Amino acid sequence: IRNMKTKTAIISVDNLKSGDLAVLKQVLENVPGVDQVDFNLERSVAVIDFDPGQSHIDDFLRAVLQAGFKVL
């Protein structure tokens, strides 16, 4: 049973392709407090459920940028 109150962050990633998902998922899951990462290729977004007590949207933006992706 999860006690944490999660928030959801949606990050637009420029030109997101199916081949990018595994790398991007791993990068985002390495950020503390991440509960779940999903993607919508049609909308080119990453959807992250996380514990706001452990991480912030800036942490996800930084991780995506450091992995070589462009955030929109």
Image (cartoon, rainbow, N blue to C red):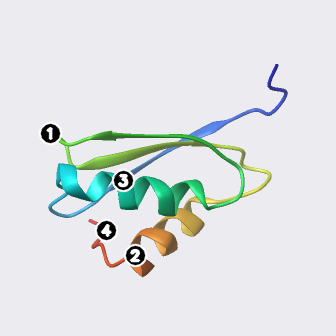
Viewer-closest of 29 and 65: 29
Local crowd size for mark 3, using a 10 Å CA cut-off: few (<14), some (14–19), many (≥20): few
- Between disc 1 and disc 2, whose residue precedes? 1
Q: How far apart are marks 4 and 1 (CA)?
A: 16 Å
Identify which residue is drawn at 19% across, 49% down.
18
Q: Distance between the residues labelled 1 and 2?
A: 21 Å
For mark 4, give the secondary structure.
loop
Q: Which mark is residue 22?
A: 3
Callout 3 amino acid: Ala
Q: Distance between the residues labelled 3 and 1?
A: 17 Å
Quadrant of the image containing the C terminus: bottom left
For mark 1, give the secondary structure.
loop
Whole-percent x, y for residue 60 in the image: 52, 63
- Between disc 4 and disc 1, whose residue precedes? 1
For mark 2, give the secondary structure.
loop
Residue 48 shown left or right of residue 3 in the figure: left
- Between disc 3 and disc 1, whose residue precedes? 3
Single out the mark in the foreground, 2 or 3. 3
For mark 3, give the secondary structure.
helix
The reply to whether dot 4 and dot 3 touch (C-beta < 8 Å) is no
Whole-percent x, y for residue 45 in the image: 29, 48
Instruction: Give the farthest residue toward the top.
Output: 1
Whole-percent x, y for residue 57 in the image: 56, 59
Callout 4 amino acid: Val
Single out the mark in the foreground, 3 or 1. 3
Callout 2 amino acid: Ala
